[in-house]
Amino acid sequence: MPDVAEASRFQQEVLGFKLRERLVPAGGDEVGAWLSVMTKAHDLALTKEPAPTTGRLHHLAYAVPETSDVIRAADVFLENDVFIEFGPAKHSRTQGFFLYVYEPGGNRVEVFTGGIHIFAPDFETVTWDTESKGRGTAWGLGVPESFHTHATPPFGGASA
């Protein structure tokens, strides 16, 4: 989406989402917003679209009960020749344990567990200006370039 802040405001004002975290690089526009309707760190993540288009899907996410379920999913994907793009690892933001793969149709799918839950009614939005301590993940694993460019449907040379 071209304007993350505008889309975030719509989600909050019209649909009742709460803004939990956002990414605003120093001197730049908001490029990420994580929103929820209940206690999860996010039910919806909005990010800036790198291609000059709209309506592309970054990923779908499936929640599993335990960290071991994410690790088992990685083994199942590996055994079935499903491309593992990223993880298993832990997000710096939201603190969820994750794995990203491409399903046969080319869509990115996340399998995740955990993450923070927010129960304080006066919780204040966390604003990030860059990756935490220069890290793409909590434990320092770099983010693959495809994570910022691949979406479906593909757009010209923008998708991996």
Image (cartoon, grey):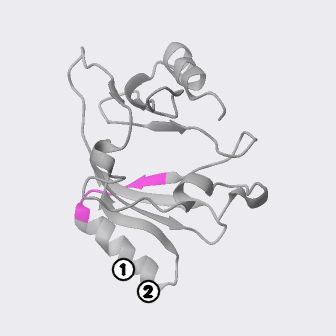
Is label 2 in a helix, a strand or a loop? helix
Question: How far across and how far down the image is residue 33, in percent?
Answer: 46, 32
Q: Which residue is painted at 24% across and 16% down in the image?
A: 121
- Viewer-side residue, 62 vs 74: 74
Q: Quadrant of residue 97?
A: bottom left
Amino acid on which disc 2 is placed: Glu
User: Residue 95 in the image: x percent, y percent?
Assistant: 27, 46
Amino acid bearing label 1: Asp
Looking at the image, residue 56 lies above or below residue 62: above
Residue 78 position, x and y percent, is 43, 82
Q: Is residue 92 visible?
A: no
Q: Residues within 10 Å of mark 1 (few under 14, many from 20)?
A: few
Q: Look at the image and say whether residue 66 sits in the magenta stretch.
A: yes
Q: Is residue 31 magenta?
A: no
Classify the position of the N terminus by image quarter.
top right
Q: Residue at x 24, y 39 (%)?
A: 116
Is the C-beta separation of discs 1 and 2 under 8 Å?
A: yes
Residue indicated by mark 2: 79
Name the residue tied to disc 1. Answer: 75
- Residue 50 occupies which quadrant of the picture? top right
State the separation of the CA atoms marked 1 and 2: 6 Å
The residue sitting at 37% across, 66% down in the picture is 87
Q: Residues within 10 Å of mark 2 (few under 14, many from 20)?
A: few
